[in-house]
Amino acid sequence: MNPYVLTILLSSLGLGTVLTFASSHWLLAWMGLEINTLAIIPIMTQQHHPRAIEATTKYFLTQATAAAMILFASTTNAWLMGEWEIHQLSHPLATTTVMLALALKLGLAPVHFWLPEVLQGLELTTGLILSTWQKLAPFALMIQVAPTINSSLLVAIGLLSTLVGGWGGLNQTQLRKILAYSSIAHLGWMVLILQFAPSLTLLSLSLYIIMTSSAFLTLKTNNALTINTLATSWTKSPTLAALAALVLLSLGGLPPLSGFMPKWLILQELTKQGLPLSATLAAMTALLSLYFYLRLCYALTLTIYPNTLTATAPWRLNFTMITLPLSIITILALGLLPLTPAVTAMLAL
């Protein structure tokens, strides 16, 4: 793609998100989401492949549906209650419709079906943008409208997402689909605590972005799209293979890695709020996710696959990729747990 065109598209992507962040009026927020969607579509189709075109079409249809629902809900609220402000969303029909629309935008269960299919059709860099940056604008709106939404609905969507995210990834061999189900599960954890401690949701979102970026960049560096390819990538860079296994365990939420911090604090907060059953169910569904992360780690570090790849051996190619962002983000994805006391002190302020 022409660098000037790419610069304009990425600038529009940033503009759409910032516009949604800064808006207090539903129409302005809706415009930001639309700019965001329209800016990423050419980036998704830059790989001229029928699978990418199909993924882009699915993405466009789901995002357009969600945007139409948001517009419908905000218009309904303005008609019935006379308010266009995001904070003044008060009619039950409007709040429920907006919640479902934002769930569709983010890929939360039970409206998650588009996310694995779309992510599977994209290259890893575009998949990284879709899994991280594209979550920011809908989450900003969700945090603003969360106080008006029924808490039982939020908890139900959160638990269902963690369950679907764990269950869906069990039988997958495609790494992009596994990361899509991982995304659904992590978003479920964030929604679960959204009404009780929004600051914890922001902490979880930040760490999710760091860990997911590290996972995608590692796969990009190894040029791995399936478990099979990942299993043979240790010959190219043994150090990176070992770090990739640790990043996956961090995504699974194992101590002493960074991914344990949000899960620990969320379970603690749920217990404080008098929801021990929800906390127990969330912890149980985390075990499902942990299983497929461990499966990836096993394939990556403990097995030598008895197969012959027909592709060019990756370790014979000249390595020209810039690895500084990967190294910085991997350090953050692995080593932030000791900062937990400082983080809890900041959250308590």
Image (spheres, rainbow, N blue to C red):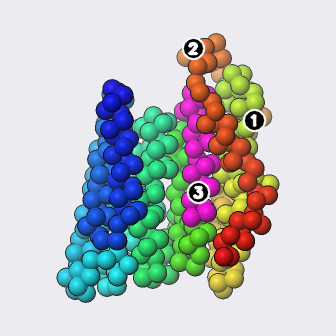
Q: Residue at x 46, y 56 (%)?
A: 135
Badge 2 amino acid: Thr
What secondary structure is found at the residue carrying circle 3?
helix
What secondary structure is found at the residue carrying circle 2?
loop
Q: Residues within 10 Å of mark 2 (few under 14, many from 20)?
A: few
- The residue where tag 3 is placed is 206
Q: Which portion, as a residue range, is magenta? A: 202-226
Q: Is residue 196 above or below residue 205?
A: below
Task: Mark 1 or mark 2: name the one nearer the start of the chain.
Answer: 1
- The residue where tag 1 is placed is 242
- The residue where tag 2 is placed is 312
Q: Residue at x 56, y 32 (%)?
A: 220
What secondary structure is found at the residue carrying circle 1?
helix
Q: Judge left or right: residue 161 versus residue 274.
A: left
Residue 104 x/y as whole percent: 38, 61
Residue 65 x/y as whole percent: 27, 59
